Image: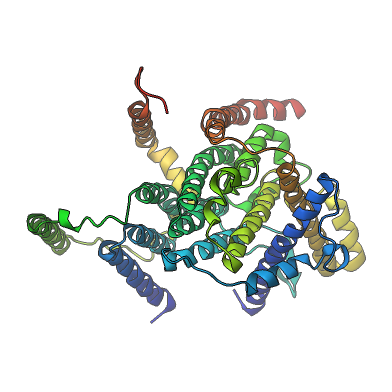
Amino acid sequence: MNSAISFFYFLSFLTVLSAVMVVVSRNPIHSVLYLILTFFTLSGHYILLNAQFLAAVNIIVYAGAIMVLFLFVIMFLNMKQDNEESKTNLTKIAATIVGGTVFVILFGAYRKSVIPGFDPQQFDSQIGMIENLGHLLFRDYLLPFELVSILLLVAMVGAVMLGKREIGERHF
Amino acid sequence: MDLTEFLIKTATIFVVFVLTLVIAMYSTWGERKVAGFIQDRMGPNRAGPGGLLQPLADAGKMFFKEDFIPALANKWLFIAGPSLAMLTALLASAVIPFGSTFRINGHEVALQGVESNIGILYVFGVVALGVYGIMVGGWASNNKFSLLGAIRAASQNISYEVAMGLSLIAILMMSSSLSLGEIVAQQHGGNWNIFYQPLGFIIFITCSFAECNRVPFDLPECETELVGGYHTEYGSMKLGFYLFAEYINMFISSAIISVLYFGGYNYPGMDWVYTQLTQALGTETGHNVATLIGTAVFFGKALFFIFFYMWVRWTIPRFRYDQLMNLGWKKLIPLAIFNIIITGAAVLFLKPMITAWLN
C-alpha cells in the first residue's frame, strides 16, 4: 500500500474516532475539543486532496474562530449541575427515532448516489491551489461570490441590530 | 526531493527550532535587563557574567519545583493547557523565511521550513489557535479568576484577529501572493512594505501586542484584578511553559513583522555585498556567506522588535478592558478598512500613474 493511502486511512480513522467522541463525551468541553480535533483531521484530508487554501481557511474559520466562541459560551455554563433528570424516556425515544431516520436517509442517499469518476490523465492536480481558486472565483463566478458577500454583510448587520441595546434599556 | 536536500531541510528545521527556543529563553533575560535599564537598576547580575546564566537557573528552578495539580481541576485539560500553548507557539515558525537560499553541491535549498503558497494564512491559522492553550488551561483550573482570564483572552484574541486580518489584506493586495518567501523577495532593493503601508503596520503591531497578551493588552493576566489571570493555579514547569510560550509568540510575531513590513533578510546594499562575496569566495561559498549575512540581518530586525515589545511593556500602563474593546472594534477595524480602500485605490490608479510618469 502506498504511503498516501495508508495516511488517508489513518486520518479517516482519526476523523471518525474524534467525531464519535464528540457525541459520546459526557463533558461538553471535551466534546468541543474533540470537534476541534475533527476539524483538524478534515483539514488534513483537504491537504491530501491538494486543497491547501481550503485547509487553512477551515482551520482559521472553524477551529480558530467559531469553536473559540463555542468554548466561550460553554465555559459560562455551570458544568457541575447534573441535568440528567431533564432527559426523560420520551426525549430519549424521540432522539432515537430522529437519529435513526437521519441515518436511514443518509444511507439510502449513499446507496442511490453515483460517484462521478475522473480521468487521471486530464485531472489538474493544481486545481485546489489558491491562484486557480482565485481565478475561478473572481472571473467565472464573480456574481455569485459578490452575492454571497452581500448575504454575509446582511447577516452581520442583522446580528449587530439584534445585539444592540434598545433606548432606555439598562446599561451595565 | 533527494537525500541532500532532505538533510539540509531537516537541519534547517532543527536549527530554527533550537534558535526559537534559545531566543525565547534569552528574551526572559533580556526583558529583565531592559526593565532594569528603564527603571535605573541593574537587573539580573548574579548568575554568570551579566546574569547570562539566569535563564538556565530559572529553568532549573521551574523543573524541580513540585508539579502540583489542584484537587478539583480537570487533570487532563490542566496538563493539556500549557502543552497546547507551547505547541501552537512553536508551529508558526515553519513557514518563516529566515534567509534566501543555500547552495550545497549544486543543490539550492531555501532557508525556510516549508515554502507554502498559503504561508501567511498558515501563520494566521496558528495564531488563531493560540488562544486554546489559555482557554483550556484557564477553564481546567476550576478557579473563577482563571476562568475570567481565559474568557478575556478569548474575546480579546477574536476581536484583534479581525483587525489583524484586515491589515494583512492590504499587504496581500500589494504583493498578490500569500507566500511569505514571495512577499520577502518582492521587497528586495529597499522596497520595504513599511514605506507603502505605515498605517497597516501600526494596526498590525498593535494587534500583535494584543495577540501575544503583552502589556498594554495583558488583561488575561491582569494581576490587579484577577490575581494571576489564567495561570493563577499553575506552578512549576507548567507555568514555565505558559511564560515560555508568550516569549516564543513574541519572537514569532517580531519575525513576521520584519518579514511583512521590513523586508525580512533584505538590507540596503545587499547586491553589492553579494557581488563582492561571490567574486572573492566563488559562487557557492560566496552565495552561502551572503545568505548568512542576510539571515543575521533578519534576526537583528526580529530582535529589535522583541526589544520594542519590552520597551513598550515598561513604558505604557495597562488598558482598561472596555478601552481595549473600543480600541479594537471601533478604531482599529474602521482604520484597517480605510487602509484597504486607500491601498486598493493606490494599486489601481496611483501606481500606473507613477510608473507612467517615471518612464
Compared to residue B85, the image places residue A77 above or below, namely above
As drawn, the residue found furthest toward the bottom would be: A1
Q: Position of residue B38 (x, y in %)?
A: 82, 45
| Residue B90 falls in image quadrant | bottom right
Residue A127, image x and y in percent?
43, 55
Rendered position, A138 above or below B111: above
One can see residue B333 in this view: yes
The quarter of the image holding the C terminus of chain B is top right
Q: Position of residue B165 (x, y in %)?
A: 54, 41
Residue at the extreme right of the image, as rendered = B280
Which of A129/B256 is in front? Answer: B256
Quarter of the view holding residue A3: bottom left
Q: Is residue B129 in sight in this rendering?
A: no
* Picture quadrant of residue A16: bottom left
Residue plotted at (65% across, 29% down): B352
Q: Is residue B263 above or below residue A12?
A: above
What colour scheme does the image use?
rainbow
Q: Is residue B292 left or right of residue A159?
A: right
Relative placement, left or right, of B350 versus A23 is right
Along the line of sight, the residue nearer the viewer: B6 or B91: B91
- Of residue B246 and residue B336, the one placed in the foreground of this image is B246
Left or right: B112, with B294 as reference point = left
- In this view, the residue in front, A171 or A16, is A171
Q: Is residue B308 above or below residue A1?
A: above
* The N terminus of chain B lies in quadrant: bottom right
Residue B232: % across, % down: 54, 56
